[in-house]
Image (cartoon, helix red, strand yellow):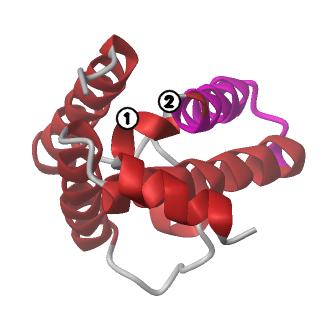
Amino acid sequence: MKKPIGVTLISYFYIFGITALIFTTFFFQQVANKIGLVDRLGIPDFPEELFRVLLAIVTLIVIYGYMNLKAWGFWLMVLYSISFGIVSYVILLSYNKQLFIGNFIWSAIVLIYSIMTHKSFFSTKDIKRIKYAK
């Protein structure tokens, strides 16, 4: 099956985001950012720089599977979108920062698009097995 253009665009967008995350981790001072990623996710005793690198590695693994239309990549992207969508929504409510509206909407778009194109990630044998499991 041909790869949907949206999967490619989403993957490249995440790769750009990972690049920006790594670049800002090593080349910019994070003093201006009062709320770090670890604080946003509720794990304040974890080193910020290490968490950013681990997040980038995990995201690259998810993007690799998603971009190559692997079933595990689909499920990891769904989980990734749901988790970061929830975190963005909670931060939006807690801190009333409009920036997180965009993060929440992006997570919702990726989740909805991924679900709409789920057949691209599974073989016809897998789809038949899923249908009969109901």
Question: Callout 1: 10 Å neighbours few (<14), some, many (20+)?
Answer: some
Q: Secondary structure at mark 1?
A: helix
Name the residue tied to disc 2: 117
Q: Residue at x 68, y 26 (%)?
A: 105
Name the residue tied to disc 1: 120
Q: Which of these two is toward me, 68 or 55?
A: 68
Q: How many marks?
A: 2
Q: Residue at x 56, y 47 (%)?
A: 81
Q: Which of these two is toward me, 95 or 61?
A: 61
Percent of width and height locating residue 117: 50, 30
Left or right of residue 39, residue 94 in this image: right
| Residue 111: quadrant of the picture | top right
Question: Callout 2: 10 Å neighbours few (<14), some, many (20+)?
Answer: some
Regarding residue 100, the answer to whether it shows in the image is yes
Percent of width and height locating residue 96: 85, 37
Q: Was residue 116 drawn as part of the magenta stretch in this picture?
A: no
| Residue 93: quadrant of the picture | top right
Q: Are marks 1 and 2 in contact (CB under 8 Å)?
A: yes
Instruction: Work out how far the residue at label 1 is from the one at label 2, CA to CA, in angstroms.
Output: 6 Å
Q: Quadrant of the C terminus?
A: bottom right
Left or right of residue 22, residue 3 in this image: right
Q: Residue at x 34, y 67 (%)?
A: 48
Residue type indicated by callout 1: Ser
Percent of width and height locating residue 40: 60, 61
Q: Secondary structure at mark 2?
A: loop
Percent of width and height locating residue 61: 20, 58
- The rendered magenta stretch, by its main secondary structure, is classed as helix
Q: Residue at x 25, y 27 (%)?
A: 1
The span shown in magenta is 95-115
Regarding residue 35, the answer to whether it shows in the image is no
Left or right of residue 2, residue 130 in this image: right
Left or right of residue 18, residue 47 in this image: right
